Image (cartoon, rainbow, N blue to C red):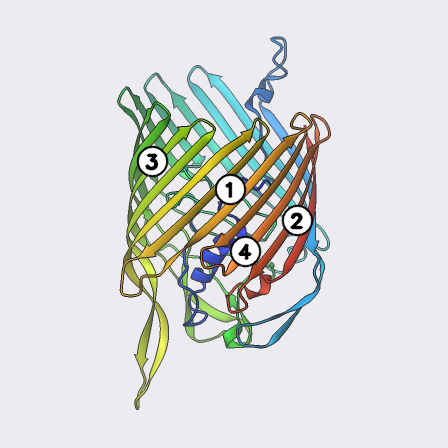
Amino acid sequence: MLRPTTLASALLLLGAGLTSAIEAQAQDFPDNISLDGGFDTLFDAQFDDSDLFGDGNSSSVPRHFRFRLSHQLSGHLNRHSTITPSGTQEQRSRGIENQRLGMNIRYQNPFASGWLLQGSAQIRAWLPGDYEYNNPERDDAEWRINELYVQRSGERHSFSFGRQTIVWGETLGNSVLDVINTTEYRDLSIIDIEDARLNQWLLVWDMFGERGNWSSFINLYPEFDPTPITGSPLFPKAPEMGGQTLRLGYHHRDKSLFEVGTRWNRSFSGSDIAVMAARLYENPLRYTLVLPGIMPGSTELATQSTINDYGLLGLSANRAIGRLLLTLDVAFSQGILSDQVNNLELPGGGSLPVPGFERRNRLGVSAGLEYGISPTQQISLSASAQQDRGPDQQTRGNMLMRYSNNLRNDDLVLSATVQSQLDGEAVLMFLGADYRLNDDWELSSQLVLTRTNTQSPLYFLDEDVRAGVTVTWNF
């Protein structure tokens, strides 16, 4: 099910990430160019590990496999027109955007003392009405391994290798430190960063001690945030250049890449503190236009991708005061690529502004609070801000408020999320209702409303209204 459980929702991360990844569209595009957050699974199977071993009866046969079959239907409801940054009018129509079947398979097997084998995979099929159905660039179905790792745990050490996730930071979903795993936002059916976070092939070593714990990782095959699917609601255009779509390619590796990091944390009475350091690659690819830009025989604009490695130093802490939990994350990134417009001198005089990149240092801070109103009601607030050091120090970031209420013995969950960029350029509201009919069947509904500045690269989401429903069968 889709749950609004984090601060880094699809719209705002795309506002900070897509507009950055397409920095070459126009010289006056915003400077917000990083995705702070991969996609565990579109249908986000949440499994209770106790289910793997039956109903608690000693005579039950352990169940290593769990399955979740989902059907999702969602669409755009509001027929209206929007004004592009170039001043032209663009008509929006209503209709189905997503209709897809999905199966998530989960496997967990503690096959020996101290050993665990865990994996999960997903299969999806596009049905008529889905923007991916009959897409010439795609098959009508896809599959992917999400998790696949083996873990060996001892008294003071734990080793795991395979596809897995590492999450740093305390401010859930809105942490400036949660930048290790990549993310994928295909469309507005994905709201939470937990749904969008992708696993990667990692070797992880955890060491536990009386004066703190260490956790270190090596990633020998770093990946990058996948680009939106051609034809999706979030696929970018270049309105200042006649509305041509952008051909966003993948990075072709010509050398070995690796990432490495380590984290120390210690718990005290009512609080935790951690410090960390890592060498990483920026998750979103950066794109520049390939002049002359227009691909022969096509209306698409050709682009060239750029990758960048950088250093990260971080600090995180939390403090519990009764029902209140306070969180703080601080990140210092050295060598981040930042937008810069260069002047290209033309023969015969004059110059042409050309978007480009420059290495800078970045300071990021995220802080939040979570409050338990009652045993069934929770509310949280958080904000994150980042600033690149340089002559044009521009602060950018996100704010979010979320609320959830569990009713009918947790069979019904009502939730609401409101998220906005600090400058108010993009705002998203998510309303959800999840109802569990019984142990096997679940029904969830979502309403997503978006508002954006008409001069924003996300102008096409202004005044959009989307609704969806997902039926799930667990077996």
Foreground label between 2 and 3? 2
Q: Pick whichever of labels 2 and 3 is earlier in the sequence.
A: 3
* Disc 3 from disc 1: Cα separation: 24 Å
* Disc 2 from disc 3: Cα separation: 39 Å
Residue at 55 percent across and 68 percent down: it is 454
Q: In x, y percent, where is residue 376?
A: 59, 29
Q: Mark 2: which amino acid?
A: Leu
Judging depth in this view, the residue of 448 and 65 nearest the camera is: 448
* Residue receiving disc 3: 217
Residue 6 circle label: 1
Q: Mark 1: which amino acid?
A: Thr
Q: Mark 4: which amino acid?
A: Val
Residue at 69 percent across and 25 percent down: it is 439
Judging depth in this view, the residue of 175 and 197 nearest the camera is: 175
Q: Pick whichever of labels 2 and 1 is earlier in the sequence.
A: 1
On screen, residue 349 above or below 285: below
Q: Mark yes or no: residue 138 visible.
A: no
Foreground label between 4 and 3? 4
Left or right: 218 in relation to 455: left
* Disc 4 from disc 3: Cα separation: 36 Å
**Label 4 crowding class (10 Å Cα cut-off): few <14, some 14-19, many 20+?**
many
